[in-house]
Amino acid sequence: MRGVSIRLSAPRRIVGDLMHFAAGVPTVPVQRHMNVGAAAAARAALPKPLRPAWAALFTKAFALVARDVPVLRRAYVKLPTPHLYEYPVSVASVAVEREYDGEPAVFGARVTDPAGLPLADLDARLRHAMTAPVGEVKEFRRSLRVARLPRPVRRGLWWLALNLARSRPNYFGTFGVSVYSGLGAESLHPLSPLTYTLNYGVIGPDGGVAVRLVYDHRVADGAAVARALARVEETLAGPVTAELRRRAPGRRASQVAAGP
């Protein structure tokens, strides 16, 4: 059957390189069914312009947990010899879909130390990555620039960036967030070269949602990841919900001081 040859575009090469290196990481998914009803109610009480995306809420919750759990800030690197490296803060890489040259393209929007950012600032950074012209987002420009290089050069640069401990978070982050729940679907085992990838499904009317953390088994074990997911649920119900409530219009200063 005669078909049509289609040259690999820059977005397809980015995903191809990502999958090439993801294939070498022994990842295992751990799932926890969470109830995020408190956060959902606090978020729904905000006017739409002030309502942060769920990706921002989950990103901050995981980063807050990682701030107290060092294993969630570690990576397996191969240079100069295989070892684990621990970072002082988390760097999130949130997958966003953009249109580039007439086709869908997936990029990673990176945010350094999301635990230390107010939700409003974290959400604004993610929205900028989702709406600004692709050429105005630094990490997107860099990804496209590398994607245009010959494959041996691209793959060499990727390998170095992933295995030089100090440069790794600058190019890839310490954890990823990848979701399709806004489209009514979810990924059961997203592939990534990152140590951790957080993924969640559609949030039900009762606040129930399946949340998965895919982890590099060279760095952590399942029990530690299961405990981390429990803490993510507690953090969403606690500090994240409290921050959402503090942003509610008409909240008195005395209420803010007293907490939720």
Image (cartoon, rainbow, N blue to C red):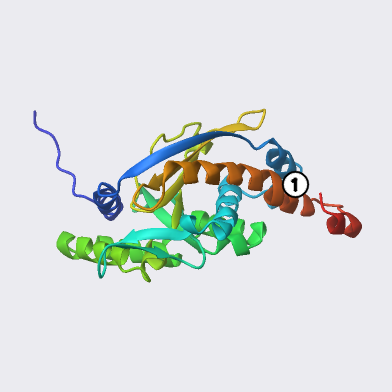
Q: Position of residue 235 (x, y in %)?
A: 65, 48
Above or below residue 35? Residue 146 is below
Crowding near the residue tagged with mark 1, few <14, some 14–19, many ≥20 C-alpha atoms within 10 Å = some
Q: Nearer the viewer, residue 255 or 31?
A: 31
Q: Quadrant of the N terminus?
A: top left
| Depth order, front residue of 162/84 | 84
Q: At 34% across and 58% down in the image, what residue appears?
A: 76
Nearest the camera: 247 or 84? Answer: 84
- Residue occupying image coordinates x 48% and y 35%: 31
Query: Is any part of residue 133 visible from this angle?
Result: no
Q: Which residue is mark 1?
A: 46
Left or right of residue 173, residue 122 in this image:
right
Question: Is residue 77 among the parts visible in the rendering?
Answer: yes
Q: Quadrant of residue 146?
A: bottom left
Considering only vertical position in the picture, is 90 above or below 103? below
Horizontally, residue 101 falls left or right of residue 156, namely right
The percent coordinates of residue 212 (x first, y second) are 48, 39
**Count of residue discs:** 1
What amino acid type is highlighted by mark number 1?
A: Leu
- Residue 43, image x, y percentages: 70, 44
**In the orientation shown, which residue stands out farthest toward the left?**
1
> Tag 1, which secondary structure?
loop
x 76%, y 42%: residue = 45
Residue sitting at x 43%, y 67% = 138
Q: Position of residue 260 (x, y in %)?
A: 81, 49
